[in-house]
């Protein structure tokens, strides 16, 4: 560089119409596979620029020197004209470097013990990766914005294998812990996923209540999330009751970060309440098209790609939560979905869904034995209207952004 800063280069190319994003991240990871143990440290740093001339341009690089070099190349690429967003403004104190990043906890032995106990010896933990990551992000733009923030998370991946006679089943689970590690919950999910498919029993129920484990309900909500990040809603979602009045869907990323990837302040957005759609999620570009303000949902999953509108931390909410044991007791005849056995399919445009899962048959509130495989499918609108009750869980699942789980009861579905 010749003493000219990146903001100065961008201002010269696109006066009043540019943004600069910077991210520095570090992580420490412990990987265990039986007696084998590996610990690693990783670091990442990069910058990304957006500007309008009047076409929308984007460039990213690992250093200021490299970014300055690729700006002319990005300016010559074919691009469509775009509207300059209404920039957020303001400033916030840049976080200091802080203390050294602590290593993640080594939880292999304890989780292995819990998996074995939960499965009565039929499942064994094979692999566990626990990662503690910290990042510092900064956004500067032509509107005078200069904000920075730091965030930290404990995430990981676990794998177990279940065995019954000559049969075996592998099980995998991603996790994200915001406060304390939830090893009992992780052990239960791994045990169920590794052993229930080995029972060889088809569903004994063809119609009844459907009780969803928190991880299954989180997958359902993750599949629904694009409904709130589009420019329009399909007719089935816009014209009638989406959920029972006492159940809401909320997106609130304020516990994770004070700003989104475009420097817009995070805030709580109630998406569904009183049974109806109440709001949409917006980044700067979609807010400009809609003639409204950004809700703080410009998501950057990497500095290498432009921000995109998406849910950041979405979850179910209710004023009348029902404890999981009461939800189970209310099942007269149905199935408890412990784990999905394939991706949950949601066709939001055509109002269809399909889920394949393994679980437990339930009669009069009591478990009647494992079910190796079952399937439900039908209209998504009917499924959501039949949600009878839920118990929100404090845990969130990386899908890939945090999605809150809930033990959820659907009053009536057909099983296959």
Image (cartoon, grey):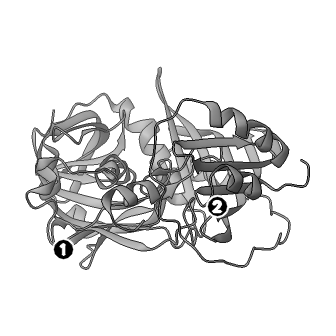
Instruction: Mark yes or no: residue 222 visible.
Output: yes
Give the percent coordinates (x, y) of residue 135: 71, 60
In the picture, measured across the screen, residue 43 lies left or right of residue 230, that is right
Quadrant where the C terminus is found in the figure: top left
159 or 28: which is nearer to us? 28
Residue in the image at 67% along x and 78% along y: 92
Give the percent coordinates (x, y) of residue 122: 50, 38
* Among the two numbered marks 1 and 2 on one chain, the one whose residue lies closer to the N terminus: 2
Please say if 58 is above or below 269: above
Q: Which mark is residue 153?
A: 2
Give the percent coordinates (x, y) of residue 373: 28, 32
Q: Which mark is residue 315?
A: none
Q: Secondary structure at mark 2?
A: strand
> Mark 1 = which residue?
246
Q: Secondary structure at mark 1?
A: loop
Give the percent coordinates (x, y) of residue 90: 61, 77
In the picture, measured across the screen, residue 236 lies left or right of residue 102, that is left
In the picture, measured across the screen, residue 362 lies left or right of residue 82, that is left
Instruction: Mark yes or no: residue 33 visible.
Output: no
């Amino acid at each position: 560089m010749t003493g000219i800063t990146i903001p100065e280069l961008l201002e010269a190319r696109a006066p009043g119409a540019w943004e600069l994003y910077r991210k520095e991240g570090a992580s420490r990871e412990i990987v265990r596979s039986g007696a084998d143990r590996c610990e690693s440290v990783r670091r990442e740093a990069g910058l990304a620029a957006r500007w309008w001339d009047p076409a929308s341009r984007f460039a990213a690089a690992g250093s200021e020197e490299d970014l300055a070099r690729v700006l002319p190349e990005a300016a010559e690429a074919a691009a469509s004209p775009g509207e300059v967003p209404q920039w957020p403004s303001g400033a916030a104190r840049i976080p200091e470097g802080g203390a050294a990043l602590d290593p993640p906890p080594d939880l292999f032995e304890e989780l292995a013990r819990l998996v074995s106990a939960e499965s009565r010896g039929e499942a064994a933990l094979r692999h566990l990766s626990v990662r503690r990551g910290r990042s510092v992000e900064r956004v500067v733009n032509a509107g005078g914005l200069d904000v920075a923030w730091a965030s930290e998370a404990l995430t990981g991946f676990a794998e177990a294998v279940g065995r019954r006679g000559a049969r075996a089943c592998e099980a995998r689970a991603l996790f994200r812990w915001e406060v304390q590690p939830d090893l009992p919950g992780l052990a239960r999910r791994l045990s169920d996923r590794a052993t229930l498919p080995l029972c060889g029993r088809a569903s004994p129920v063809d119609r009844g209540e459907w009780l969803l484990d928190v991880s299954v309900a989180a997958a359902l909500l993750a599949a629904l999330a694009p409904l709130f990040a589009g420019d329009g809603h399909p007719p089935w979602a816009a014209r009638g009751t989406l959920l029972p009045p006492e159940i809401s869907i909320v997106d609130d990323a304020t516990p994770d970060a004070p700003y989104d990837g475009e420097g817009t302040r995070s805030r709580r957005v109630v998406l569904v309440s009183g049974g109806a759609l109440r709001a949409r999620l917006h980044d700067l570009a979609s807010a400009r098209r809609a003639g409204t303000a950004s809700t703080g949902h410009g998501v950057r999953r990497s500095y290498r790609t432009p921000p995109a509108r998406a849910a950041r931390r979405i979850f179910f909410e209710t004023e009348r939560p029902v404890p999981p044991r009461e939800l189970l007791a209310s099942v007269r005849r149905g199935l408890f979905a412990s784990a999905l056995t394939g991706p949950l399919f949601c066709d939001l445009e055509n109002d269809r869904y399909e889920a394949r899962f393994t679980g437990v048959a339930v009669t009069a509130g009591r478990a009647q034995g494992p079910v190796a495989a079952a399937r439900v499918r039908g209209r998504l609108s009917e499924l959501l209207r039949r949600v009878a009750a839920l118990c929100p869980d404090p845990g969130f699942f990386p899908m890939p952004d945090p999605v809150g789980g809930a033990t959820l009861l659907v009053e009536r579905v057909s099983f296959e």
